[in-house]
Amino acid sequence: MDTFSISGKTFASRLIIGTGKYPSHPVMVKAHEASGADMVTVAVRRVNISDRSKESLLDYIDTSKYFLLPNTAGCYTADDAVRTARLGREAGLSHWVKLEVIGDERTLFPDNEALIEATRVLVREGFVVLPYTSDDPVVCRKLEDAGAAAVMPLGAPIGSGLGIQNPNNIRIIREFSRVPVIVDAGVGTASDAAFAMELGADGVLMNTAIAGAQDPAAMAEAMKFAVRAGRLAYLAGRIPRKLYATASRPIEGLVGR
């Protein structure tokens, strides 16, 4: 099995999925099951951690089956993101965190300066930090130097479904990164996920592409196979691109040759 590891923990699936935007919790459960994923991300602010007697999103996630990755969605400053990560840990969610520090409300692009600052703080406090960042190789290197356990460059703006907009950036990030590279945001359909993996990404994280589909469970299954196919194609090594055709069978020995 083609597993991969982050901070010493091994995962069987290279697909990571979210828990937001589903029509209902039962639909989310079916999508999770169809995806084959073994890690799901949950926004700390969406979890009722003050009164566990009331219904919570966590009631619909089997934590014996899925590894929980809390995220700091909705944070616009480093301080806010750090506080949210601490809150998630204190509530018993995890000392892992998908770190998000948003810099622009309309595009939801990350504030990379604040992201690096928050990464340094949380790493010092013992967190396993997976930062959502722009597809900038320099920023990814700085995040790695700050102690990030993986880097998560966007493929396109969150929820846009545009697919991978800067494939060369992803290739460069993968070439120089010493930690796993997980493409996060922008995937719209299965071919986008396969392409991300063909570029050499170690995994793909998505939410809207599955939750917003007409049939979330069917799309989750499609993404499962797309991630596997893209990974296998990357490992197999594609043929080089050529300007002209190459015969699929030898032409030596043919009449007139």
Image (cartoon, rainbow, N blue to C red):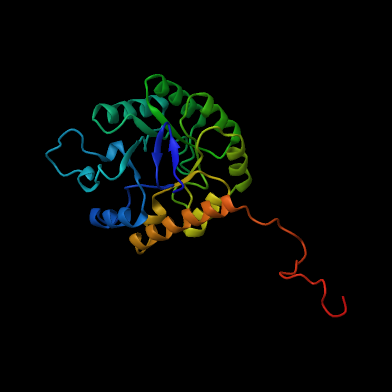
Residue at point 38%, 59% (across, down): 221
- Seen as rendered, the residue at the extreme bottom is 255
Q: Residue furthest front?
A: 253
Lateral position of residue 4 relative to residue 94, left or right: right
Total numbered badges shown on the rendered structure: 0
Measured as percent of width and height from the top left, residue 236 is found at: 59, 53
- Decide if residue 136 is on the left or right side of residue 80: right
Relative to 109, residue 248 above or below: below
* Outermost residue, left side: 53
> Relative to 40, does residue 225 appear above or below in the rendering?
below
**Residue 92 on image: x %, y %:** 24, 30
Which x, y percent locates residue 94?
Answer: 30, 32
Residue 64, picture quadrant: top left
Residue drawn at (24%, 53%) of the image: 25
Tell which of 26 and 7 is nearer to you.
7
Residue drawn at the location 31% of the way across and 26% of the way down? 86
Q: Residue furthest top?
A: 124
The relative height of residue 169 versus residue 129 in the rendered view (above or below) is below
Residue 18, visible in the rendered structure: yes
77 and 172: which is toward the camera = 172
The quarter of the picture where the C terminus appears is: bottom right
In x, y percent, where is residue 130? 43, 34
Residue shown at the point (36%, 53%) measured from the top left: 36
Is residue 163 something that shows in the picture?
Answer: no
